[in-house]
């Protein structure tokens, strides 16, 4: 039977395998390991790659090594700290700096503006202090009130001859005093205290009490809080004139009860009646009218009814 060429080649290759196997067995094991290691790491030993695949692997390993070294160098640079202290200037540098300050160009216009602003600030501060002292004095009855500021708050005018004055004390509850202040604001009345907490030499406690009574919002703090339009006076003379020994008490005082007591006499006009009792202002006015003062309380009652 004829044999094709491929069958003949296969037969020759099969016949050669036993010869190759015997040759491999005859090579020492150390030589085989050295050859294998040289083939696996050609880049590490510096040997030239035997094919394109090994060359590509060697180039990739070299690129990774360069990237690793660059990353480590970047981290080392970032960890470096700057100077912890300012460099000491030399004598020459210090001399030049002070010479520059001494020979700086003068600015008379800027100096004049600064002095003008300082003077204006001092004048404004003095005016504010004077106004605050005047307001405190008016509130405590130590000086005459500002009639333009009190327009509509109190009614001491000629056509409003009787002003409701409610005698109170600092020992009364703040809630009660605030309620009376709200009612007196409608009736154009006045809150009168015999003295100040802590004595006449201590203004702070009385100022704090006045703010708590007259402040519209009890939770507000500071000078910007809105206050009720009620005049508050500290007047021991008006207590003595009307014989008030307990509070609260109501009197319809003719004239101007907010006038400083140091400017009034003991025989100044006084109310015809004094009504005692822990009642609303409307009830005290009704009792005053029942005692014969209908004409005196008419205006105050009409204002309360318009609420």
Image (cartoon, rainbow, N blue to C red):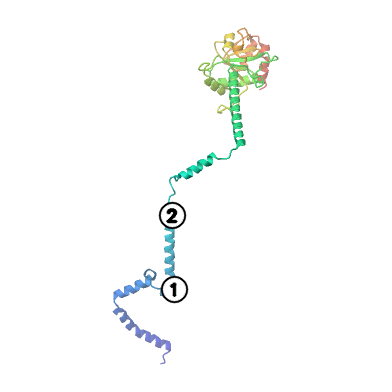
Front residue of this view, candidates 25 and 292:
25
Q: Residue at x 46, y 43 (%)?
A: 91
Quarter of the rendering containing residue 207:
top right
Total label count?
2
For label 1, count other residues whose C-alpha is less than 10 Å away and answer few (under 14), some (14-19) or many (20+).
few
In which quadrant is the C terminus drawn? top right
Quarter of the rendering containing residue 140:
top right
The percent coordinates of residue 242 (x first, y second) are 59, 9
Question: Helix, strand, or loop for circle 1?
Answer: helix
Residue at label 1?
52
Q: Residue at x 32, y 79 (%)?
A: 24
**Residue extending farthest top:** 267
Q: Residue at x 35, y 84 (%)?
A: 16
Residue 148 in the figure: left or right of residue 142: right
Residue 303 visible in the picture: yes
Quarter of the rendering containing residue 133:
top right
**Residue extending farthest bottom:** 1
The percent coordinates of residue 23 (x first, y second) are 31, 81
Q: Which mark is residue 77?
A: 2
Front residue of this view, candidates 305 and 299:
299
Above or below — where is 214 with respect to 106? above
Above or below — where is 241 with respect to 4? above
Residue 160 in the figure: left or right of residue 114: right
* Chain-order first, disc 1 or disc 2: 1
Above or below — where is 64 with respect to 237? below
For label 2, count other residues whose C-alpha is less than 10 Å away and answer few (under 14), some (14-19) or many (20+).
few
Residue 225 visible in the picture: no
Q: CA distance from mark 1 to mark 2?
A: 38 Å
Above or below — where is 228 with respect to 271? below
């Amino acid at each position: 039977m004829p044999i094709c060429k491929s069958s003949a080649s296969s037969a020759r290759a099969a016949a050669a395998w036993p010869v190759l196997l015997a040759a491999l067995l005859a090579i020492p094991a150390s030589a085989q390991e050295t050859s294998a290691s040289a083939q696996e790491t050609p880049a590490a030993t510096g040997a030239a790659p035997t094919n394109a695949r090994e060359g590509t692997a060697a180039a990739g390993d070299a690129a990774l090594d360069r990237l690793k070294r660059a990353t480590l160098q970047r981290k080392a640079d970032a960890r470096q700290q700057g100077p912890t202290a300012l460099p000491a200037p030399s004598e020459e540098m210090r001399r030049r700096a002070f010479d520059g300050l001494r020979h700086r160009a003068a600015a008379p216009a800027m100096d004049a503006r600064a002095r003008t602003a300082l003077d204006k600030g001092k004048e404004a501060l003095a005016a504010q202090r004077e106004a605050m002292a005047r307001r405190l004095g008016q509130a405590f009855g130590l000086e005459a009130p500002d009639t333009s500021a009190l327009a509509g708050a109190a009614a001491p005018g000629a056509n409003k001859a009787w002003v409701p004055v409610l005698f109170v004390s600092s020992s009364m509850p703040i809630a009660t005093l605030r309620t009376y202040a709200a009612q007196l604001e409608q009736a154009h009345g006045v809150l009168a205290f015999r003295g100040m907490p802590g004595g006449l030499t201590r203004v702070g406690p009385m100022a704090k009490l006045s703010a708590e009574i007259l402040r519209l919002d009890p939770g507000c703090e500071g000078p910007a809080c809105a206050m009720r339009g009620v005049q508050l006076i500290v007047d021991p003379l008006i207590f003595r004139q009307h014989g008030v020994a307990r509070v609260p008490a109501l009197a319809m005082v003719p004239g101007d009860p907010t006038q400083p007591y140091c400017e009034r006499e003991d025989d100044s006009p006084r109310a015809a009646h004094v009504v005692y009792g822990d009642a609303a202002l409307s009830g005290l006015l009704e009792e005053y009218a029942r005692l014969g003062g209908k004409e005196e309380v008419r205006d105050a009652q009409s204002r309360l009814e318009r609420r």
